[in-house]
Image (cartoon, rainbow, N blue to C red):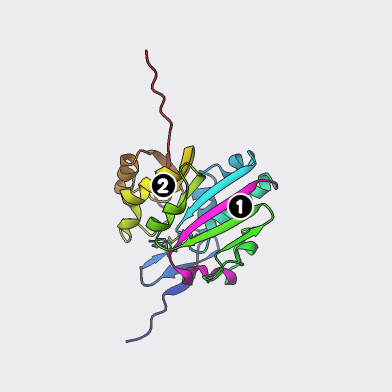
Amino acid sequence: MPFIQKLKKITTADNTESFHNQEVGESYHSHSGAVEEAYKKYVIPCKIKEIAKTGSLKILDVCFGIGYNSAAAISAALEENPNCQIEVIGLENDPEIINQIKDLSPPIPYYEHYKKLSGHSLQFTHENVTVKILLGDAHDTVKNIQDNYVDAIFFDPFSPKTAPHMWNTDILKQMYRVIKENAIFSTYSCARIVRDNLKEVGFIYDDGPIVGRRGPGTIAFKIEIFIVNV
Ligand SMILES: C[S@@+](CC[C@H](N)C(=O)[O-])C[C@H]1O[C@@H](n2cnc3c(N)ncnc32)[C@H](O)[C@@H]1O
């Protein structure tokens, strides 16, 4: 049987590189533009620049892959406030994809620092920024994060069709637990099952941005409800 390489490098329509996973049969980013997707589906809807103004930003990057989403977020945050204290927690189960980071040079200013990451070196601190990848199944590793801890969640698994377990209520309950009130969870999917599951665990959702020719993404919030006695 011929050997089929798992990861095939591709160039997306904004001329930035990504990978196609030939075992899963899906790409790591939208073909309409990998870096464009990072900014338009995650950084902008999660209001990263606005949070950076407060001086503290904690991001959960679920399904970290080659890290474009959170590297773009750090770049945007530091542009807004170079003194912002930033912590990124990445959840990823495949060291092979993390090992690709060192050979990539996307037009994301902070990405040069991400090249310190590999399947063996899963964290770094540089000045006011800490990035830490928790290696393993996200269902388990997320349990190491405190309640109400993060200011934004970038949720980027393979599709609900290919990886339904990554969109089930077990993992979404954990997302609800770790996100702060009024903080934004963003994902590229607008699938009915995803939105139903978000609602079931307590999130309120809305359409996210439309990028490329796909449907909208989904943004979701955990909103504090005040019960007023009348
Ligand atoms: C669509 S790609 C994410 C792309 C990524 N956000 C980026 O910017 O490169 C999905 C990622 O989920 C990871 N993954 C799949 N199953 C996982 C699991 N159970 N726990 C953690 N990560 C998982 C895959 O290895 C892959 O890197």
Under circle 2, the secondary element is helix
The response on whether ligand 1 sits within 8 Å of label 2 is: no
Percent coordinates x, y for residue 53 in the rendering: 64, 39
Q: Which residue is mark 2?
A: 175
Task: Give the quarter of the figure containing the N terminus.
Answer: bottom left
Q: Which label number is shown at residue 74?
A: 1
Q: In this rendering, is residue 94 above or below 156?
A: below
Magenta part of the protein: which range? 83-102
Q: In this rendering, is residue 43 above or below 10?
A: above
Q: In this rendering, is residue 81 above or below 7?
A: above
Amino acid on which the number 2 mark rests in the picture: Met
Q: Quadrant of residue 157?
A: bottom left
Q: Is residue 90 magenta?
A: yes
Q: Which label number is shown at residue 190?
A: none
How far separated are the C-alphas under marks 1 and 2? 21 Å
Q: Nearer the viewer, residue 44 or 56?
A: 56
Percent coordinates x, y for residue 101 in the rendering: 56, 68
Under circle 1, the secondary element is helix
Q: Ligand 1 sits in which quadrant?
A: bottom left
Tag 1–tag 2 contact (CB < 8 Å): no
Q: Nearer the viewer, residue 140 or 25?
A: 140
Percent coordinates x, y for residue 192 in the rendering: 30, 46
Percent coordinates x, y for residue 16 in the rendering: 55, 64
